[in-house]
Amino acid sequence: MPHTQADPPSSSVLSDATVAGMPFADDLIRTHTALALTHAIQAVAPHRDLPWLRDAASTLAPLKLRERSDLLRDALLHDLDGSYADFAGVIRQAQTSDLYFSGWLIWPVTGAVAEKAVQDASPAAFDDALALLAALTSRLSSEFAIRTLLRHDLIRALEVIQSTWLHVDDVDVRRLASEGTRPYLPWATRVPGLTVESFPTRPILDALYRDDSEYVRRSVANHLNDVSRFNAGDVVDTARSWLAAPDANTTGVVRRGLRTLIKQGDPGALELMGFRSSPLEVTGPTLNRDTLRVGEDLTFSARITNVGSDPARLSIDYTVHHKKANGRTSGKTFKLAVRQLAPGETTEISKTHSFRLITTRKYYPGTHAIELLINGVSTGRASFRLDAPA
């Protein structure tokens, strides 16, 4: 699946790979992918036998997606042993000579580029690998491979990214600058230096939050939200500085970047988005049933009245408190609505929540609960019993 702006093959594609009409995630890299990679390398390096790649093509079946990528990465490193310069030369030749050198076969290629540069251990190889990952990212995002280089020398990697990637014409490279350096990039290895309170990636976000591309701005917002998990103060300060020098899209970027802090009721984030404490009268949440089975839906409603003398801007969320296997409960918060209420005005809200079986959650019978949150403050909670499927 080639990388395009309309359908970027980033972590979002990986997590959605089992949607109807798409292959299972593991099959995104399959025998055909390995053979295509082998053919592309053989075409520009005919003197190489490539036994590891050829063998890998027949051993992918029992492996998961990441394991398949790693197997092809390691096979490529075995077959193209020698210096980093020679290795990178072969990859660049394949890039320029093969129109089909793109899509999911690029994932193991970029991983091999990063590993080879780290093995070389020279500054020249490190810098060249960053340049090569930038050149390949339009064929499939290099966001996973760059983590190897960030872990090896974070300071140098950030210096190169900030000096060469932030203002290039290639939207995929600008997006890579933000997405590849996210502290909690899904599917990616962690980079300890990115989860420190010094917020080393702020210059990247400051340069890109007003980017012309929504594709880049969305990555910036997700990156800012990642940082909010361990550094709320600097995230709010960053958002405040952006709102002081905004464009037409800045409010949307900030709103998405502060979404976790808003759900958590962070005072600074709430105030920045115009959500202030207001006197309210709340009835609910009221449930349409007190018992249901896994696979069914639960509907709840609430009535909210602004009893103050000033307009009230409300961020309304709800938390589902799930019973766990050990008998304790664990909450997951969902966005519900934003309302603006004049003094004396009332709004009624209703939401249907599904308890259908999904791959990312296991339901346990017992007492669960719905909790209503307004501007991050709990305003009511109602319990119900969830039973096993019929």
Image (cartoon, rainbow, N blue to C red):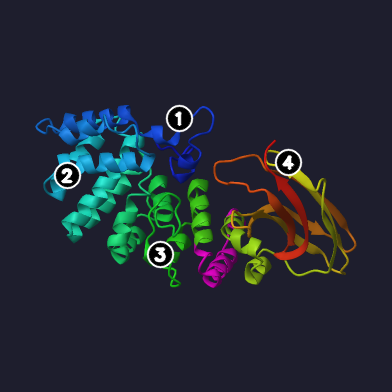
In front: label 3 or label 4: 4
| Helix, strand or loop status at disc 2 | helix
Type of residue at label 1? Answer: Pro
Quote the CA–CA distance across marks 3 and 1: 33 Å
Quote the CA–CA distance across marks 2 and 3: 29 Å
Q: Position of residue 334 (x, y in %)?
A: 66, 53
Type of residue at label 4? Answer: Asp
Asked whether the beta carbons under mark 2 and mark 4 sit within 8 Å of each other, the answer is: no
- Identify the image quadrant of residue 236: bottom right
Along the polypeptide, which appears first: circle 2 or circle 4? 2
Quote the CA–CA distance across marks 3 and 4: 40 Å
Q: Is residue 172 left or right of residue 69?
A: right
Along the polypeptide, which appears first: circle 2 or circle 3? 2
Type of residue at label 3? Answer: Leu
| Helix, strand or loop status at disc 1 | loop
The residue carrying mark 3 is 194
In front: label 3 or label 1: 1
The residue carrying mark 4 is 297
Along the polypeptide, which appears first: circle 4 or circle 1? 1
Residue drawn at x 50%, y 63% is 227
Tell me which segment is drawn in magenta.
Answer: 227-251
The residue carrying mark 1 is 23
- Identify the image quadrant of residue 120: bottom left
Number of disc labels: 4
The residue carrying mark 2 is 87
In front: label 2 or label 4: 4
Asked whether the beta carbons under mark 3 and mark 4 sit within 8 Å of each other, the answer is: no
